[in-house]
Amino acid sequence: MIGVGLQKYNQFLSNNSVRALEPGDEALVTTLELIKSSFAFMAGLIDPPSSVERLTLKKLKTMAEVGRVLVIGKPVIACVVATPLTHALYLGKIAVDPSMRGQGLVRALIEECEALAENLGKNCLELQVRIELVQNEKMFAKLGFIKVSDDCHLGYDRVTEITMQKPVC
């Protein structure tokens, strides 16, 4: 039975492989919708509010120019924005369609980002998790990310987010 599950998973991923969107790709529209809907639950939960509230299609297109907007599915069911920093490949706007959670999509995106980081000569992946989102921190820890710092947003005198990194071999 385990072999059948693995076979279905591998078939699922092969039919929904990770791809990078170009700045003019029409799929950026559904990607933006996915990000906004996936982050909507945070309204009123996190302080300060998420930058997703200010995310526009124009900004997402710029993110595709500066870094990579990686997605899975047609239509898009999972995404991550990967942006090169001097010391790492930064991952943001990670979103998965709620009906597709638990299918290994974030893992597939992270693996693609690891390969991208290696190609760019980066030693690690980096992301930030809001302090209130303990489940997200636990999920990323299971994927090999470790907490490297407590951080606070400008104007706050308390920890508002943590930075996590995953070494790239």
Image: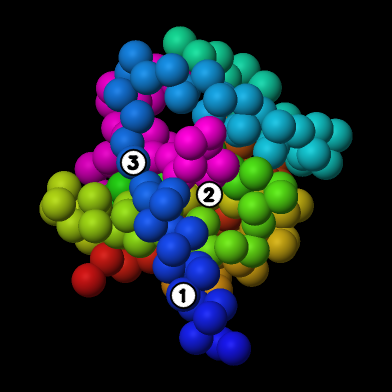
Instruction: Tell me where the magenta segment starts and ends, as one range.
Output: 59-87
Say whether marks 1 and 3 touch (CB < 8 Å).
Answer: no
- In the displayed structure, 50 sits above or below 16; it is above
Name the secondary structure under disc 2: strand
Q: CA distance from mark 1 to mark 3?
A: 21 Å
Mark 2 or 1, nearer chain start: 1
Type of residue at label 1? Gln
Question: In the rendered image, which residue does mark 1 sit on?
Answer: 7
Mark 1 or 3: the one toward you: 1
Q: CA distance from mark 2 to mark 1?
A: 33 Å
Type of residue at label 3? Arg
Q: Where's the C terminus, which quadrant?
A: bottom left
Name the secondary structure under disc 1: helix
Residue 128 - label: 2
* Whole-percent x, y for residue 28 in the image: 46, 23
Question: In the rendered image, which residue does mark 3 sit on?
Answer: 19
The residue lying furthest to the right in this view is 44
Identified at 59% across, 88% down, the residue is 1
Q: Which of the two residues, 34 or 2, is positioned nearer the viewer here?
A: 2
Query: How many tags in the picture?
Result: 3
Query: Is residue 72 on the magenta stretch?
Result: yes
Q: Work out whether residue 85 can be spotted.
A: yes
- In the displayed structure, 104 sits above or below 30; it is below
Q: CA distance from mark 2 to mark 3?
A: 23 Å
Q: Residues within 10 Å of mark 1 (few under 14, many from 20)?
A: few
Q: Which of the two residues, 104 or 131, is positioned nearer the viewer here?
A: 104
Q: Which of the two residues, 11 or 65, is positioned nearer the viewer here?
A: 11
Mark 1 or 3, nearer chain start: 1
Mark 2 or 3: the one toward you: 3
Identified at 37% across, 19% down, the residue is 25
Q: Residues within 10 Å of mark 2 (few under 14, many from 20)?
A: some
Say whether marks 2 and 1 touch (CB < 8 Å).
Answer: no
